[in-house]
Image: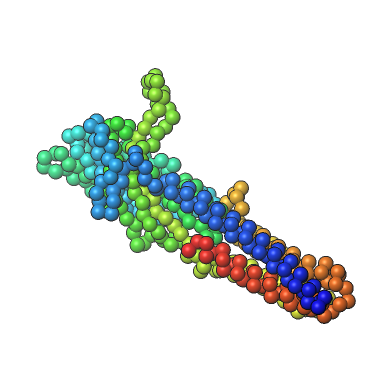
């Protein structure tokens, strides 16, 4: 009876430790996923001052300002030539078109339009947090009445982008192209998204990511300065900013297990120490400890430094804790039990079953939070 009570106490103790680790880990994962999603929503969510188009291209929230002329614009993303999380930048090719009434606003000089490569300085727009490397006029047209003009540009550009790696390797990234007019503030010009035509080419691909939803909207972007143009009480300048965003997302379970399969196998090998001779137990778990550390440094080099604990670091930390608990079982627990082999064997089996179930369930539960 005393032996059964001892086994029950040991089982409850081990189960409690593992449940606490699991609860803390999953709570943290849920929390950082929520922060990530909120950060992404800030860039593509709509508020009362934004202009956007619904799926049927009905215009919403167009500011009722008699002085601001509307320029309709859209983007077709044709290629992503480079995607670098470490350097926080991406390179891409895209088409952007503009439609406007040249009788009401001189968005660009129609007399100077001609097909071919032009200088980035002569374009009527700029990419915020980006640099135009090459720009070419592909097509332009003015109707007979002279009240409708169209121009289509092909642009090669590089943009800096904040990549949130807190949920790596289950991360979701938002690639943004932010376009503003050079010469017109928001009270003179307002971009109107051509949402129905703004798409991503089927050729666009990024290694290990899937292409997700496309978002287009026009936001008012305010600078807390008038750039010294004049002395006013309102020391600020506001521009209409067209935003084109495309979501990149991981394939939950597949990419998670593909990335961490080496680690999972290493930890499963460490469980073999439960059945090894005493002389072989510590070398097995010690080897797994060093292999886990080496594996972490290999995968950790694929993401930039971050002050947050990433999913990758969380999984490796729990894996190291698992190895530590195995060592604890094979040293401290055995030392306390002494020569009672029957009690030791029963506790060993209880610990083995609880810990291997915990580890497998943990690695199932983490990616499930991102479905």
- Quarter-wise, where is residue 100 in the image? top left
Residue 102: x percent and y percent? 19, 36
Residue 369: x percent and y percent? 52, 62
Farthest residue to the right: give it. 339
- Quarter-wise, where is residue 329 in the image? bottom right
* Front position in the image: 284 or 30: 30
Residue at the image position 14 percent from the left and 43 percent from the top: 143
Q: Is residue 199 above or below residue 144?
A: below
Q: Is residue 295 left or right of residue 198?
A: right
Tally of numbered discs? 0
* Front position in the image: 195 or 38: 38
Q: Is residue 305 left or right of residue 107?
A: right
Q: Is residue 328 above or below residue 171?
A: below
Q: Is residue 32 above or below residue 256?
A: above
Residue at the image position 83 percent from the left and 67 percent from the top: 332
Residue at the image position 28 percent from the left and 45 percent from the top: 60
* Front position in the image: 291 or 357: 357
Q: Is residue 15 above or below residue 230?
A: below
Residue 79 visible in the picture = no
């Amino acid at each position: 009876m005393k032996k059964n009570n001892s086994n029950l106490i040991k089982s409850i103790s081990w189960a409690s430790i593992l449940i606490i680790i699991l609860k803390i880990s999953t709570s943290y994962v849920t929390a950082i996923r929520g922060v990530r999603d909120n950060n992404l929503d800030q860039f593509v969510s709509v508020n009362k001052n934004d202009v956007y188009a619904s799926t049927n291209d009905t215009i919403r929230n167009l500011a009722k300002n008699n002085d601001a002329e509307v320029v309709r614009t859209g983007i077709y993303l044709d290629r992503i030539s480079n995607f670098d999380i470490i350097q926080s930048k991406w390179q891409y090719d895209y088409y952007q078109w503009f439609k406007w009434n040249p009788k009401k606003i001189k968005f660009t000089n129609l007399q100077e339009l001609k097909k071919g490569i032009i200088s980035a300085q002569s374009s009527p727009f700029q990419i915020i947090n980006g640099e135009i490397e090459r720009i070419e006029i592909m097509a332009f047209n003015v109707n007979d009445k002279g009240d409708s003009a169209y121009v289509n540009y092909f642009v090669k550009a590089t943009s800096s982008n904040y990549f949130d790696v807190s949920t790596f390797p289950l991360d979701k990234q938002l690639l943004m192209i932010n376009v503003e007019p050079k010469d017109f503030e928001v009270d003179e010009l307002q971009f109107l998204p051509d949402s129905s035509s703004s798409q991503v080419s089927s050729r666009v691909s990024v290694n290990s990511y899937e292409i997700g939803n496309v978002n287009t909207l026009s936001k008012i972007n305010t600078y807390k300065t008038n750039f010294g143009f004049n002395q006013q009480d309102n020391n600020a300048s506001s521009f209409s900013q067209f935003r084109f965003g495309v979501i990149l997302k991981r394939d939950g379970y597949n990419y998670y297990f593909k990335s961490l399969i080496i680690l999972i196998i290493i930890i499963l090998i460490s469980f073999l120490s439960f059945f090894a001779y005493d002389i072989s137990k510590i070398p097995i778990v010690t080897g797994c400890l060093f292999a886990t550390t080496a594996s972490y440094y290999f995968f950790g080099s694929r993401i930039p430094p971050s002050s947050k604990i990433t999913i990758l670091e969380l999984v490796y930390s729990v894996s190291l804790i698992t190895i530590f608990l195995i060592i604890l079982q094979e040293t401290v627990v055995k030392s306390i039990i002494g020569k009672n082999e029957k009690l030791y064997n029963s506790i060993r089996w209880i610990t083995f079953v609880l810990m291997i179930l915990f580890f497998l369930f943990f690695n199932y539960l983490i990616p499930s939070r991102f479905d």
